[in-house]
Amino acid sequence: QVQLVESGGGLVQAGGSLRLSCAASGRTFSNYIMGWFRQAPGKEREFVAAIRRNADSTYYADSVKGRFTISRDNAKNTVSLQMNSLRPEDTAVYYCAARGSAWTNIIRTYNYDYWGQGTQVTVSS
């Protein structure tokens, strides 16, 4: 089992920044690909970003590319999402997730094994 706890959400004006963090406990953190997803009211959960086990590769949804940056610290068992130039359409509950298998189909929610409870991000216009 891997337990994931997100933090750092909040209310921010459009154009502002937030940094989300996800703390992991349980099994060896460095064994897992880590991802961030988000879910807006009335919409399906969607992929935001992912990072490989040793952080040598990342992947982003087109909607956040150039604005968001995913990073991880395997020594501290944390993964972060730096969000800049936030837009009202970024408003959602943000979830971190852990995947124990290969770096394939990483945008699919069903390919992740563990999920956090989520943190709310609200961007006002």
Image (spheres, grey):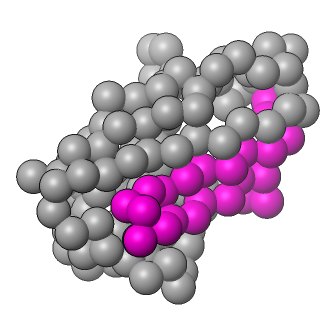
Point 80% across, 44% down: residue: 84
Quarter assignment of residue 121? top right
Which residue is farthest left? Answer: 1
Residue 25 in the image: x percent, y percent? 24, 52
Q: Is residue 87 above or below residue 108?
A: above
For the record, the magenta segment spans 64-87
Magenta stretch encompasses residue 45: no
Q: Residue 110 or 13: which is nearer the viewer?
A: 13
Residue 9 in the image: x percent, y percent? 59, 27
Residue 97 in the image: x percent, y percent? 33, 50
Residue 64 in the image: x percent, y percent? 70, 50
Q: In the image, is 25 to the left or to the right of 61?
A: left
Q: In the image, is 4 to the left or to the right of 68?
A: left
Point 23% across, 58% down: residue: 111
Magenta stretch encompasses residue 74: yes
Q: Is residue 37 visible?
A: yes
Quarter assignment of residue 11? top right
